[in-house]
Amino acid sequence: MKKGLLEYTNNDLENASVETVYNAVLKLTQNKIKETPHVSGERKVYYMSAEFLIGKLLTNNLMNLGIYDEVKDILASHGRSISEIEDFDPEPSLGNGGLGRLAACFLDSIATLGINGEGLGLSYHYGLFKQVFKDHQQTEEKDVWLDKPSWLRPTEHTYPVTIGDTKLQSRMYEIDVLGYNKEKTTLRLFDLESLDEKLVEKGIEFDQEAIDKNLTLFLYPDDSTEKGLRLRFAQQYFMVESGIQYIIETHKEHLDELDKHIVIQINDTHPAMAVLLLIKKLLEHDISFEKAVSIVSSVFAYTNHTILAEALEKWPLAYFEAVDSEMLSILMKLDEVVKKRSTNPNVQLIDKDNLVHMAALSIHFSFSVNGVAALHTDILVNSELKDYADMYPGKFNNKTNGITFRRWLQFSNPSLSQYIEDKIGDGFKKDATELVKLESFINDETVLHDIMDIKQAQKERLKDFLLLSDNVSLDTNSILDIQIKRLHEYKRQQLNLLYIIYMVQKIEKGYKPKRPVTFIFGSKAAPAYTIAKDIIHALLTLSTIIEKDALLSQYIHIIFVENYNVTKAEYLIPACDVSEQISLASKEASGTGNMKLMLNGAITLGTLDGANVEIKDHVGDDNIYIFGEDSDTIITHYENADYVSRDYYNSIPELKDAVDYLVSETMLAEGNKVNLERLYNELLNKDWFMTFIDFEDYVKVKDQMFEDYEDKLKWAKMSLMNIANAGFFSSDRTIADYNKDIWKV
Ligand SMILES: *Cc1c(COP(=O)(O)O)cnc(C)c1O
């Protein structure tokens, strides 16, 4: 090892540039990875996803290879620190949020369990976007990650893709994904050969029509215009056309019984067009239409991630025609098939406005449809997708999401991980349910104090990190209350905002909190999502107001970390005390941030939504803080259309004061009138995600939580119970379930 490192750095490890040392470690690691066996087997699963939010890979790979300490020591003996190399490692920008992070955790578990599976997706040159704050506003820039040598490796595999009249070429790239102490798998990412990075002008603007140059520039390009929508559609087509060609090439000997050999799991409906394209390819290989439909229906399995009506994909029929007329004719034939099965308008492929429902395509022509948490699946089966569930009762199943404990405990919180190992042995690394052994220490004050000390040390580590990354100073004596996730009204960052204002107003009236609270946010808003950006603006504005105020800044801080990503999550999560999981009940399919935070000993403050319900079942009512209306109540309000936010505003004085503060002189003096008034009016006149309905209960429970924090032993016990009962939420369990019930590889 040492020899290799020296050789790659011209025998001058001491004085080589960080880049040279990084490249040396990269090469060395890649050579080691080459020796690791690849998952294999008769039957194979392809996990198709528009996103893979994999995070940095260096530390992960070194640790999984078991050479992290050795490399660290060699570097240290030459006066180099491994952390400068880890910092240099670029974070691939291939995802957006929970759905993409899930795909990354799944690949880790697939490799660790030795399941014969691979990931298929796209290589985006500039990712989603890099978030930069200017004048209390989110602005977007391209997220450059491919400018240095990276883990992405080109292959010789290229595929022709024709979109309308435009002939394009797709090239496959690979990223190795290492399991823990075992095998590896491959993430295969397709890229446009003729891509032109120079197309990007200022910020993230570019010519949306030049698909021969722009197709893989960004993930989820702006879809607020017709051009943008067509681009997204073309991008999806490019992904699945490339993926299906690769699959056909790999399995060409047994196309007529393809369903015996492969499963394609589609992560939400972004890859749903693959159903049509696989039929197209089978027809080209002289398989009859009926047979092709039957094969495809036993190949595809579909994971649903949302019940938000506006997020269920629908594409105009005209787009199919413009991109591939053959695909269109297959779609029309499938439409006939569906009509024969049912005349119910709720389950048709094409609606009266000539929109194609991608969920309908995914459900009718797959053999499995799963939700991602027990409550979510329940809502799918009993309300959102009820007509489908009645049609295909055996198809629907639940697979509660999970996270890889390698990244979210062992690598991101090594001190806690080591401590757990000292107490209960290292069995939990292979079988996460062994964490429950920690419960035997519930009355051991030494252990409880140790847990508190580790949390404190993680706060110090976060302080150092945030100073460098965001140039902010963290008060490590404060309670860390953290809400990190995409910005969306259903996730209700605005409810958290209203609580902070409520606290501000209480302090101004003379209340003195026992301990300061730091409210940390990390969140990107979709570039065209106006209200989401207004919420960011309000939080950034309030943050400055508080910092400038001598009284308030003794008790409250708001830190909005810029450009939230996996690396930032890895520092924030181990330091967290209060995990904010406050979505409107019935709207969050599962959440996985909630799982990462409980695993690191944070206590959940949440609604009975998504996987919070199962977290509560596992930790028990005494170790979680639940507030708000339940999903049945909320669903009924939507059905009756009887929620009126103004009624709550008029009847709850603290709520009225907090909402009015958004457009107070103080806020308008520091912030922007347009943003603040728009947010104020939205909440007062619409509030589609019912922020106000839970305000009173949220305040009550959160106040109680901050009070309980002062009982340190009680808090440490809750923390321990959360860690001990996180085992169920390991993605190893999730993937074992997918394999047992769906993939059977
Ligand atoms: C886990 C994770 C998410 C998902 O968070 P939720 O709270 O489940 O929405 C999003 N982004 C990053 C970077 C993550 O690591």
Image (cartoon, helix red, strand yellow):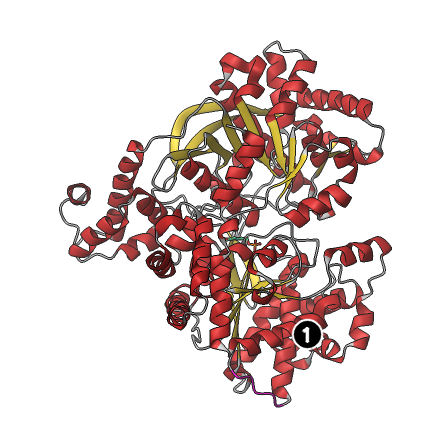
Residue shown at the point (41%, 63%) measured from the top left:
469
Q: Which residues are magenta?
A: 510-514
Q: Find residue 219 and report its horizontal and vertical position in percent.
A: 55, 43
Question: In the rendered view of the protein, which quadrant contains the N terminus?
Answer: top left
Looking at the rendered structure, the kind of residue marked 1 is Leu
Report whether 723 appears left or right of 633: left
Q: Residues within 10 Å of mark 1 (few under 14, many from 20)?
A: many
Principal secondary structure, stretch drawn in magenta:
loop
**Magenta stretch: residue 455 in it?**
no
Residue shown at the point (30%, 57%) measured from the top left:
83
Q: Find residue 489 and report its horizontal and vertical position in percent.
A: 67, 59
Residue shown at the point (37%, 71%) measured from the top left:
446
Residue shown at the point (15%, 44%) measured from the top left:
10
**Magenta stretch: residue 513 in it?**
yes
Q: Find residue 652 and report its horizontal and vertical position in percent.
A: 77, 77
Report whether 705 appears left or right of 198: right
Depth check, front residue: 211 or 566: 566
Farthest-out residue, bottom: 510
Report whether 702 appears left or right of 17: right
Q: Find residue 218 and report its horizontal and vertical position in percent.
A: 53, 43
Q: Is residue 684 positioned above or below 513 on the image?
A: above
Report whether 640 appears left or right of 382: right
Q: Which residue is mark 1?
A: 662
SS type, badge 1: loop
